[in-house]
Amino acid sequence: MASCTAFHLLLLPFLLLIIQSPTNANLEGDALYALRRAVKDPGHVLQSWDPTLTDPCTWFHVTCDGDNRVTRLDLGNAKLSGSLVPELGKLVRLQYLELYMNELMGPIPKELGNLKSLVSLDLYLNNLTGTIPASLSKLSNLKFLRLNGNRLTGRIPRELTKLESLKILDVSNNDLCGTIPTSGSFSKLTEESFLNNSRLEGPELMGFVRYNAAGRCK
């Protein structure tokens, strides 16, 4: 009896792995399929995204790791139109979210701040509106944040200066306002990161305007 119990205990981690793996795949597949439902795809680049398949790792433009968890989504210049979906925040091992040069509209979901493994967030050259979510400051591994060429408004969240891994930030060619934060990781950025935002003032380090000044954000 004791040897039988020990055998079952040894099997338990493997059984849990078998049970968990399809669950994670289904969860991530549902998240990706939510994106497919939210966009128009005239080029049929998402044709392989079949919700009846339990493993999204077989879909085109999706890369997974050895645990069959989604790590990369490559849909740049794919002629997609529509909106981003909050379900993308469930892809917790995602490292690269590449959705640049499409015709995406609407806000950047705050749930993208849940992507703790994210290294690169490329949403440039779309038609995104609304503000830059402060929740992106939770992306401690983020190195590349490119949001240029959209129609984003509001202030640059000061919380983003806490992104210690950030190497490249580009929010140029939007309609941002207020002053430019210059502390933390922003201290190494150049003015090219912020060009062509006619209501953007600063940088705050100059001392002429405070970050929380009203500026032209009204």
Image (cartoon, rainbow, N blue to C red):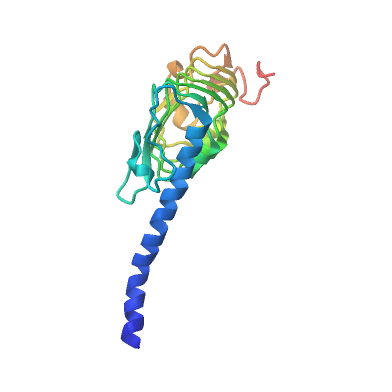
Please give left or right for residue 179 compared with residue 163 in the image: right
> Taking 203 as reference, is 8 above or below it?
below
User: In which quadrant of the rendered image does the N terminus lie?
Assistant: bottom left
> Taking 22 as reference, is 174 above or below it?
above
Quadrant of the rendered structure where residue 178 is?
Answer: top right
Quadrant of the rendered structure where residue 48 is?
Answer: top left
Please give left or right for residue 181 compared with residue 59 in the image: right
* Residue name at image x 33 percent, y 51 percent: 67
Q: In front: 218, or 202?
A: 218
User: Can residue 211 be seen from the camera position used here?
Assistant: yes
Residue 133 in picture, x, y percent from top left = 56, 32
User: In which quadrant of the rendered image does the C terminus lie?
Assistant: top right
Residue 72 in picture, x, y percent from top left = 36, 37
Residue 184 in picture, x, y percent from top left = 47, 32
Quadrant of the rendered structure where residue 116 is?
Answer: top left
Residue 69 in picture, x, y percent from top left = 37, 47
Please give left or right for residue 218 compared with residue 75 in the image: right
User: In the rendered picture of this protein, how many numbered marks are placed on residues?
Assistant: 0
Query: Furthest residue to the bottom?
Result: 1
Q: In front: 211, or 40?
A: 40
* Residue name at image x 43 percent, y 45 percent: 52
* Residue name at image x 35 percent, y 33 percent: 61
Q: In front: 124, or 50?
A: 50
Q: In front: 66, or 80?
A: 80
User: Can residue 138 be seen from the camera position used here?
Assistant: no
